[in-house]
Amino acid sequence: MTDKIIDYFHNVDLQEQDEQGKYLVKVKDVQAAMKEAADQIETLKQIESLVKKEVMEQSQIRGGAVEGFMPD
C-alpha cells in the first residue's frame, strides 16, 4: 500500500487536462492524499512500536542475565 502511495506522488501530473481544458488532478486532492499518507506513516510507527514492545516482553532473559554478555 505504501509503495502505491509513493508511486502516486511520483507520477501525479498537476498539468494534465481533459478535452475541455479542465485539470484532471486537483491540488486539493493531492494535499488530502499527502495528509492521509502522513497519517498512515504515524499509524505504521505505532504498530512497529507495539510489535517491538511485544517482542521484547517475550524475549526477556531470566535470572538477571544481560543479553550479549560473554564471560572470559
Image: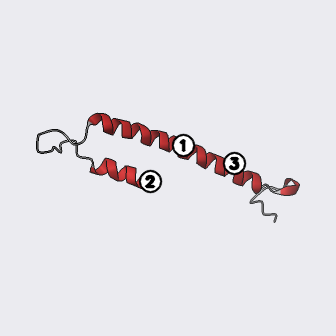
- Determine the CA span between mark 3 and mark 2: 24 Å
Name which of mark 3 and mark 1 comes first in the sequence: 1
Q: Residues within 10 Å of mark 3 (few under 14, many from 20)?
A: few
Tell me whether circle 3 and circle 1 mark residues in contact (CB < 8 Å).
no
Q: Nearer the viewer, residue 37 or 61?
A: 37
Amino acid beneath label 3: Lys
> Circle 1 — which element?
helix
- Determine the CA span between mark 3 and mark 1: 15 Å
Relative image position of residue 57 (x, y in whole percent): 75, 51
- Determine the CA span between mark 1 and mark 2: 13 Å
Amino acid beneath label 1: Thr
In the image, farthest residue toward the left: 20
> Circle 2 — which element?
loop
In the image, farthest residue toward the front: 20
Q: Nearer the viewer, residue 69 or 55?
A: 55
Which residue in the protein does label 2 denote?
1
Q: Residues within 10 Å of mark 1 (few under 14, many from 20)?
A: few
Q: Which mark is residue 53?
A: 3
Which residue in the protein does label 1 denote?
43
What residue do we see at 16% from left, 43% from top?
Answer: 17
Foreground mark, 3 or 2, reads 2
Q: Quadrant of residue 27?
A: top left
Q: Is residue 68 above or below residue 28?
A: below
Q: Nearer the viewer, residue 57 or 20?
A: 20
Q: Along the horizontal axis of the image, is 31 left or right of 68?
A: left
